[in-house]
Amino acid sequence: MTEIFNPRTFLDNTGPEIEYSIIVYGSKPGDTLTDARYGMHQRRVEINVFPRLPRNNMSAAEMDRFCASFLACFWWDIKHNNFWHCEFCDKESRVSKTNFMSFVNLDPPKANSYVHLVCDNESGPCANFLRAAGMTLGVLTGARTSTPEQVSSGRTHPLASSCAKCRADTSALSELAHCSGCKLTRYCSEKCQKDDWKRHKPFCKTPKEVKWVWD
Ligand SMILES: [Zn+2]
Ligand SMILES: [Zn+2]
Ligand SMILES: [Zn+2]
């Protein structure tokens, strides 16, 4: 399979832009069980990136794959939401699940990823709720949905609010500073930010809009 996304070189891509919206949902402890917890107005961050595709005339499947690998490569850059907890309960968020919706047949091509921060995405009431919500989304919109990023069984991720570099749970104990460039990615220290710059740079330089709906 030819590589269609290379984070080291993708700033040099010359294909058309794709409008890619990534929306990350979470909660804070004490959020009430109303819309603030789950619904139209829930806590989230909306990130609009406009990466250039590697070339013209890519197939729909290739564009889908490009978005999926973009998200996978920059997972740690977008995951950090200070003190955000599971979307559905007061437990800390350790894993996430992504619903991907493809509109790449439009001109210009578009795609959305909905990232849900949850305590457990495999079993228990929150996992069930998430599954049900994912199915409703597919039925309502009629869009093709898939899950490009899913945590494999038995893997425990650090907290959603841990540092993008050291990823230590302990880093969530203090306020994590945003990267001043993208205003999104979080670090526990200047050293971690500096050490991570080479990896983070392509994401940081992607033209984007970051809109916090509550922080
Ligand atoms: Zn939960
Ligand atoms: Zn760190
Ligand atoms: Zn940045």
Image: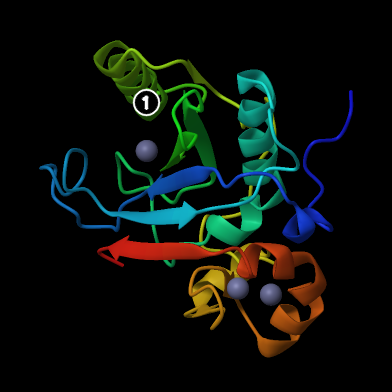
Residue 171 lies, in percent from the top left, at: 60, 72
Report whether residue 166 is seen: no
- Position of 26 with respect to 69 (left or right) is left
Report whether residue 69 is seen: yes
Residue under the image location 64 percent in, 50 percent down: 52
Q: Give the residue number, with chain letter if any, for mark 1.
A: 130
Residue under the image location 68 percent in, 43 percent down: 53
Q: Is mark 1 within 8 Å of ligand 1?
A: no
Residue 77 lies, in percent from the top left, at: 61, 60
Residue 125 lies, in percent from the top left, at: 34, 24
- Position of 120 with respect to 149 (left or right) is left
- Of 191 and 4, nearer the camera is 4
- Of 180 and 19, nearer the camera is 19
Q: Is residue 138 above or below residue 150?
A: above
Q: Residue furthest bottom?
A: 190
Residue 175 lies, in percent from the top left, at: 47, 80
* Quadrant assignment for ligand 2: bottom right
Q: Amino acid at mark 1?
A: Leu
Q: Residue furthest left?
A: 34
